[in-house]
Amino acid sequence: MGAQRGTCQRSFKTNHRVVAVSCHLPYKTNCFFSKDLIAWVCIAALWGSVVFFAGCTAAPLMNARKEFYSNDPLKAADSLSELRDFPSNDKLLLFMEKGLIQHHLGRYEESINEFFKASKLIEEQETISLSRQSLSLVTTDWITQYKGEYSERLWVHTYLMMNFLLLHKYESALVEAKKALKVLEKHPESLADDYFTRALIALCYENLGQTNDAYIEYKKLAGLMHSPYPVAGELYRLGSQLGFTKEAEHYKKVIPKSQFALLKKKPAGELILFVGVGTGPVKVSDDIIAPASIRFSFPRYESRGFSDAQIIVSDSGQRLPAVSVTTSIDKVASASLQARASKIVVKETARAAIKEAMAQAVEHKNESVIGVLLRAALFLMEEADTRCWETLPASLKLIRLRILRPGKHHFKVTVVRGRGIVEEITLPEISVSSGRKIYHSIRVNN
């Protein structure tokens, strides 16, 4: 005798997109679960709920994030360095958070080591654990290894590039630039707005005199942005060197006359700033409750605080002309998660159907108490996987300043939001010599 079936239909909106959910649930099904199996599932489900609510992400990691955003990155780094045992499911998060905190402290070699671990783990995770994936269909995605969003995987290489450039290891920076390009090529639509990383890639080619490749990357970037202005100077300069006269003249028209006059002068050196602004987004859970106590839970990114600010750089009190390329971490992270939306919906629907079948199987056996307990446990466990890289800034800026005068300089960075000054940072005394690029990285939190 065939099972009678019912249909549950709902729609939800995630990141500005409506997704329909339709799951076919077996009612009064001829039970294909044994009574012993049902009992063990009940026990496992209840135990899983307890473990889940005891702490989804390892407490030391959560504490380190709080210390970082309480302007105590040194304490955050120390607390994470003392860890001996850490849940394997969150290892990628640990490496990424440690890498960024060490970068913020100016410990670039230590940061490189952590991001290398993250990069290696991402490669290893391409081999999916089928047992964990199968179990997550009955419980929750929290039991699987966190693999990182497409954007987070890209930003591992972005920070490695920054670290190598800050250490003037240009060959190593270019290796990471090529890896970043592969990620961008694999996910072109969801990562299209990461202008900062693309500008960094072009800079890596430029540093090693690979002018044609640098020009190609700058040209790609110009085509992605609303205006080519932020990289028009590089395109004019490199295009002229390569003999692309017509294209160089095209980009010349975009450059203001005052800046073009400076561009024609030979600089003594160049100051390049990497600026992280604000507090990056976090994932939160959006829930939909359907009849028969069925819960659908979907992750989305939520912004925290301001995401952008004006960066003014002065030298001995005189404001310097600058061009900058900015990536909104909030925007790119959300687009990256949205690219996985259809896969999340399919898995959520399948999980809801399996859980409902299990609950109905128990009820069919007149195990009402166990059925109630099982439904409660399965309902509680249905929680969206909201793990993410939380120490990221809300935006990343690459700022280039051509320094005309050789010698010692005293730079000050002023961060302005609205009409107020958020922060003033005085850089260490910097000596500028002919043809030298000077790199510096700063972070401005809320």
Image (cartoon, rainbow, N blue to C red):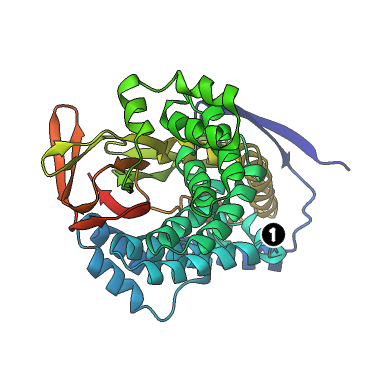
Q: Residue furthest bottom?
A: 84
Compared with 242, 273 (above or below) is below
Q: Residue at x 25, y 63 (%)?
A: 73
Q: Position of residue 318 (x, y in %)?
A: 14, 37
Compared with 259, 114 (above or below) is below
Q: Position of residue 107 (x, y in %)?
A: 33, 68
Compared with 257, 278 (above or below) is below
Q: Please identify the quadrant where the N terminus is shown.
A: top right
Counting the numbered discs, the total is 1
Q: Residue at x 19, y 27 (%)?
A: 418
Please state if 169 lies on the left or on the right of 350 as rendered: left
Q: Position of residue 196 (x, y in %)?
A: 45, 41
Quarter where residue 64 is shown: bottom left
Callout 1, which amino acid?
Ser
Q: Please identify the quadrant where the C terminus is shown.
A: top left
Q: Residue furthest top?
A: 253
Question: Along the line of sight, which residue is nearer the eye, 232 or 64?
Answer: 232
* Residue 233 can be seen in this image: yes
* Residue 294 can be seen in this image: no
Please state if 228 lies on the left or on the right of 214 as rendered: left
Q: Which residue is under mark 1? A: 134
Check disc 1 and report its element: helix, strand or loop. Answer: helix
Q: Residue at x 76, y 36 (%)?
A: 5
Q: Residue at x 50, y 59 (%)?
A: 173
Question: Along the line of sight, which residue is nearer the eye, 369 or 354?
Answer: 354
Q: Position of residue 201 (x, y in %)?
A: 52, 47
